[in-house]
């Protein structure tokens, strides 16, 4: 048997549609024919990829890169499959495709000169699309041989011919061979680079997808879930709510966990509750949308009960009319009723199903709303399931004991538990105790002990020393050390380095100047800082408030007949009236009351005292002095009401007359007699 020479033009039968005049097609005509076919194929490919595009979008919304890339690859395979079917069908049936027919091009078997067999057509189409995936590098084979047959034609034993004698190609020249080789090499290089990089990316995405936790979730929550005590592990969103109520994580972390819970259906109820709490107080409409979903899902759940209470709270106003006061009382009573359901009593078992987040939310609101202190103490008795929650319970217990004027018990609570607390919570608790001791008992031994514990707990590398509460407490403690001869003004320089906020550095520098020879410059710095407009809840607000307190303390040392000092104190008093939302509002008011009482401006002292009484209701000595100031200001009825309210107070501490001056005791007796006569 003699084989034909494949490189010679072969006479073709007449029924082959005039193929006897066909010659090798031009590369540009082949390219144009493929473009025409792709234009026709594009809508069909888009339909084939549509389901996978949706999967890509869903994966991106869930921030799942691996699933997104995998769905994209599936869509690409579907599109290529459409192209393979298209090529196979048309080439095996007619030897050409719609795009090739436009340019008079057809694909023929190199041995017979007729249309390829179906298997060869499929093999050719599959190789063609594989070449396209490799950035078309094999296509440059049209410049590498006489018949201009690239890889897919060689694999399928085919050739592309043109019936248009004017559009037939001559064998490639040397320049074409060189250019084709250069482009093919470049395409292969870039294709290899792209595939290698994509393989690395896909491998990394697969590793992240196989991890137990999604990496963009909060690390603090992941750690807390792993260390949570109990037989069953809580959901991530439940832990996130507990840590948020404990002050361990911020709203950004809670928002991330809420989104994860909603998208993955892992605690949708608490996810909606968390989203509502994030917007509560800032965007009432948005918050109510999420709250409504909570109660729609489970109307009898703990989450819906908390939502109901927050709705009651949002309907109350901050006015001082009798209706507003009664409404606020109803809100507090509703919260106390909810708190009692969480406490075991005789004949009723404890609610073992009550999660930690619910206890912490109730405790927080009881403390803020000045609810029944006994409920707070009972809610803090049960052991916590995580150290961060336990630290917050210790803090609430110590603070409410201090509020009840049981300061020895409060100090004992802190001193006995501080070593077992996490570092951050230890710094927060000791900073609070140090500040309270310094404001209420000045440079006492207990204040020194609490401040030393605060400084030992703080970690410079972790940023504890940059917290405004730490800076303010350390600043007053440094002054106490200097007064006792145990410190130098160099401590102010160190504190200025720790204070990241410009207001903090300005406060420290002003106090340093006050304690040196340049008092005038120090006072000028305090005045400038005190008059700064600061946003509520910011770090700057704490330093601005402290500057106002220190100005009052400095002006109180001036003689009574100093008119400029009197005028400035009155300006500070007006500023205090306008800043009722400021942090440490009570400390500022206490300093004003002391300054006005020392100057015997009883009328203004009584005005400050009446507002201050609601903030320091358990400080019975200060409450009594406010009543005495009201009496001396000629407001006998107000003084009698204050004393009566004090004596029937539910707080267990008793008034110790020995702590009052003899003149104040006499005035107190007159107030009591006046009340009995009425």
Image: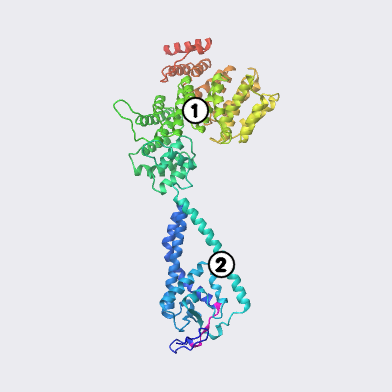
Viewer-closest of 617 and 229: 229
Name above or below for residue 586 compared with residue 629: below
Tell me, for residue 113, which label it has, or none. Answer: none
Viewer-closest of 270 and 623: 270
| Label 1 Cα crowd, 10 Å radius (few <14 / some 14-19 / many 20+) | few
Marks 2/1 in contact by CB < 8 Å: the verdict is no
Residue receiving disc 1: 419
| Label 2 Cα crowd, 10 Å radius (few <14 / some 14-19 / many 20+) | some
Residue 479 shown left or right of residue 10 in the figure = right
Q: At x 42% / y 12%, what residue is drawn?
A: 676
Can you give x and y, in whole percent of width and height, for residue 459 in the image?
A: 56, 33
Residue 26 is one of the magenta-drawn residues: yes
Tell me, for residue 188, which label it has, or none. Answer: 2
Viewer-closest of 475 and 225: 225
Element under label 1?
helix
Asked if one can make out residue 279 in the rendered structure from this viewpoint, the answer is: no
Name above or below for residue 296 compared with residue 8: above
Can you give x and y, in whole percent of width and height, for residue 386 in the image?
A: 43, 34
Can you give x and y, in whole percent of width and height, for residue 460 in the image?
A: 58, 34
Quarter of the N terminus within the rendering:
bottom left
* Sequence-first disc among 2 and 1: 2
Can you give x and y, in whole percent of width and height, for residue 342 in the image?
A: 36, 31
Residue 531 is one of the magenta-drawn residues: no
Q: At x 47% / y 83%, what residue is drawn?
A: 111
Q: CA distance from mark 2 to mark 1?
A: 65 Å
Q: Quadrant of residue 293?
A: top left
**Furthest residue toward front:** 1
Q: Which residues are magenta?
A: 20-28
Q: Quadrant of residue 145?
A: bottom right
Viewer-closest of 189 and 69: 189
Element under label 2?
helix
């Amino acid at each position: 048997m003699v084989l034909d020479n494949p490189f010679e033009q072969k006479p073709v039968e007449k029924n082959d549609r005039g193929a006897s005049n066909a010659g090798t097609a031009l590369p540009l005509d082949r390219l144009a024919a493929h473009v025409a076919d792709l234009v026709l194929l594009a809508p069909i490919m888009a339909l084939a990829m549509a389901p996978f595009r949706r999967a890509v979008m869903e994966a991106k919304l869930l921030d799942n890169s691996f699933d997104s890339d995998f769905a994209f690859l599936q869509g690409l395979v579907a599109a290529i499959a459409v192209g393979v079917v298209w090529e196979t069908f048309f080439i095996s049936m007619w030897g050409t495709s719609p795009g090739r027919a436009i340019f008079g091009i057809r694909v023929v078997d190199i041995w017979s000169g007729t249309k390829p067999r179906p298997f060869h057509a499929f093999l050719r189409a599959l190789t063609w699309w594989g070449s396209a995936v490799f950035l078309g590098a094999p296509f440059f084979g049209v410049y590498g041989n006489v018949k201009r047959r690239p890889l897919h034609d060689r694999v399928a034993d085919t050739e592309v011919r043109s019936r248009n004698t004017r559009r037939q190609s001559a064998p490639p020249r040397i320049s074409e061979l060189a250019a084709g080789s250069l482009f093919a090499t470049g395409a292969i290089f870039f294709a290899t680079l792209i595939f290698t990089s994509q393989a690395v990316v896909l491998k990394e995405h697969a590793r992240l997808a196989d991890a137990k936790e999604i990496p963009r979730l909060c690390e603090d929550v992941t750690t807390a879930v792993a260390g949570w005590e109990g037989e069953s592990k809580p959901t991530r969103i439940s832990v996130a709510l507990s840590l948020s109520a404990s002050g361990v994580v911020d709203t950004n972390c809670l928002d991330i966990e809420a989104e994860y819970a909603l998208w993955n259906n892992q605690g949708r109820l608490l996810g909606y509750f968390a989203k509502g709490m994030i917007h509560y107080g800032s965007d009432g409409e948005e918050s109510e949308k999420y709250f409504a979903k909570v109660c729609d899902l489970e109307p009898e759940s703990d989450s819906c009960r908390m939502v109901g209470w927050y709705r009651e709270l949002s309907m109350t106003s901050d006015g001082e009319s009798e209706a507003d006061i009664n409404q606020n009382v109803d809100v507090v009573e509703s919260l106390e009723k909810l708190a009692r359901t969480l406490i075991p009593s005789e004949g009723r078992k404890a609610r073992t199903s009550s999660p930690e987040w619910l206890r912490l939310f109730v405790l927080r609101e009881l403390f803020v709303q000045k609810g029944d202190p006994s409920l707070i103490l009972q809610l803090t008795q049960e052991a916590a399931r995580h150290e961060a929650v336990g630290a917050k319970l210790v803090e609430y217990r110590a603070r409410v004991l201090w509020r009840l004027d049981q300061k020895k018990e409060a100090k004992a609570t802190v001193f006995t538990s501080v070593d077992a607390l996490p570092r951050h919570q230890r710094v927060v608790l000791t900073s609070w105790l140090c500040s309270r001791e310094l404001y209420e008992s000045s440079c006492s031994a207990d204040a020194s002990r609490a401040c030393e514990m605060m400084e030992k707990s703080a970690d410079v590398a972790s940023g504890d020393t940059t917290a405004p509460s730490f800076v303010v407490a350390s600043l007053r403690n440094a002054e106490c050390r200097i007064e006792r001869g145990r410190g130098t003004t160099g401590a102010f320089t160190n504190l200025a380095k720790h204070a990241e906020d410009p207001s903090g550095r300005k406060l420290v520098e002003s106090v340093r100047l006050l304690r040196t020879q340049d008092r005038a410059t120090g006072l000028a710095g305090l005045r400038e800082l005190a008059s700064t407009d600061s946003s509520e809840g910011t770090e700057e607000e704490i330093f601005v408030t402290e500057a106002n307190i220190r100005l009052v303390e400095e002006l109180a040392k001036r003689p009574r007949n100093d008119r400029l000092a009197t005028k400035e104190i009155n300006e500070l008093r007006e500023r205090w009236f306008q800043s009722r939302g400021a942090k440490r509002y009570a400390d500022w008011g206490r300093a004003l009351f002391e300054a006005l009482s020392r100057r015997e401006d009883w009328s203004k002292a009584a005005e400050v005292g009446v507002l201050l009484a609601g903030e320091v209701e358990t400080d019975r000595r200060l409450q009594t002095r406010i009543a005495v100031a009201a009496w001396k200001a000629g407001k006998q009825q107000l003084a009698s009401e204050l004393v009566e309210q004090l004596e029937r107070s539910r707080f267990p501490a008793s008034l110790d007359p020995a702590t009052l001056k003899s003149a104040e005791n006499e005035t107190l007796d007159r107030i009591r007699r006046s009340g009995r006569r009425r």
